[in-house]
Amino acid sequence: MATLRIKQITTELLDIPIKRPHQFSTEKVADKSFVLIRLELSNGVVGIGEGTTPGIWWNGESVETMKLVIDRYAAPLLLEEDPTQNERLLQKLNRQIRGNGFAKATVEMAMFDALGKTYGVPVHQLLGGLNREKIPVRWALASGTPEGDIEEAKSLAGSGTYANFKTKSGKETPEDDAKRNIQIAEGIRGQSTIGIDPNGSWDRITAMKWMDAFFDAGIDFLEQPLPPEDIEGLALLSAMKKVPVMADESLGSVHDALRLAEARAADIFSLKIHKSGGMKNTVKIAGIAEAAGISCFGGTSLESSIGTAACLHAYASIPNLDYGCELFGPGWLADDPVKNPLTIKDGYILVPDGPGLGVELDEAKIEQYRRAEQKGVLIR
Ligand SMILES: [Mg+2]
């Protein structure tokens, strides 16, 4: 067989509505933007991938920066390269483009999809194979009021979809946030549980002061309570041995993972393929966690079924995913740009088993949600 080559890389922006406005610590959003990538090989196989972020506030990248970085810088480095040399190509991108993990993860996703389709195997087989066929999945409560969140949690927990939950904090004062979370945890006690994610918006004293109350309320974990740079503060909270402390924004690269492990600054790593530059790096980070006795949680950048499938292939291949995942993106969007959306059932999300990512684009929906100024024009 002639050596495979990457022949063409194209990108386009999509804006897909969400079911209900979602309150992050910094902004409320009503739709979600994506960069869709198509990577064509010399054998005619087209791999797809998707880049998305919670927002530019999260780590400085946006779908617009991802599109620019892929079109202008990453694509020229990859054309005519051999896609089977995945690791070498990722190193090439890293040497020539600093940072921009979300953009790199998007490119890697399309490469893995194309390779899986070429070999006729699901991507998880290219990452070491399955440790599990389905993963417990949490839903994010973000109705805006504790009463609304309690009602939503009770209704979902009884409906055969999501069994456990996460809350977002950071819009109110840390003190009010803490009280609200305890109210929600107490309100659903016996039926379900929550983890708390203030997205780095609290301070050390608030987190320490409320730790005993969080523990008593049965809260599962405290995710990134402090600013990403405050590794020492996270270590102080972890040392309390109360509610497990999760690192999210503090953890991007494999080097971050080693630093956090050495500083004993996290009990749990929130994995995310985009922030870490792809599935391969995510699996490497899980390896560092495994050696350090740190558990993993499968985080989300709120992907559609395309990016969520990529997350699932990576997460399902690692052994220490002790806290399940939060891959609720496909259930949160009002529509999904694939013909075969992922399945969430009885508190679990199922790992797709078709070739590549295992999802198929719905071209009519891509046309429908393509960003207005790009309608009719596929930008190289
Ligand atoms: Mg988070």
Image: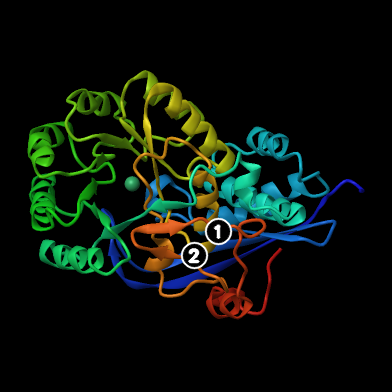
Residue 36, position in %: x, y? Answer: 59, 63
Judge whether residue 72 can be spotted in this image: no
Q: Secondary structure at mark 1?
A: loop
- Which is nearer the eye, 115 or 12? 115
Residue shown at 67% from the left, 33% from the top: 91
Q: CA distance from mark 1 to mark 2?
A: 7 Å
Among all residues in the image, which is located at the extreme top? 262
Residue 345, position in %: x, y? Answer: 38, 64
The 10 Å Cα crowd at callout 2, few under 14, some 14 to 19, many 20 or more, is many
Q: Earlier in the sequence, mark 1 or mark 2?
A: 2
Colour scheme of the rendered structure? rainbow
Residue 186, position in %: x, y? Answer: 8, 52
Residue 5 as seen in the image, left or right of residue 271: right
Residue shown at 27% from the left, 23% from the top: 232
- Classify mark 2 as within 8 Å of ligand 1 or not, answering yes or no: no
Q: Quadrant of the C terminus?
A: bottom right
Residue 95 sits above or below residue 164 on the image: above
Among all residues in the image, which is located at the extreme right? 2
Q: Which residue is mark 1?
A: 352
Residue 227: name its quadrant: top left
Q: Amino acid at mark 1?
A: Pro
Q: How many marks?
A: 2
Residue shown at 72% from the left, 34% from the top: 88
The 10 Å Cα crowd at callout 1, few under 14, some 14 to 19, many 20 or more, is many
Q: Which residue is mark 2?
A: 342
Contact, mark 1 vs mark 2 (Cβ under 8 Å): yes
Residue 335 as seen in the image, left or right of residue 371: left
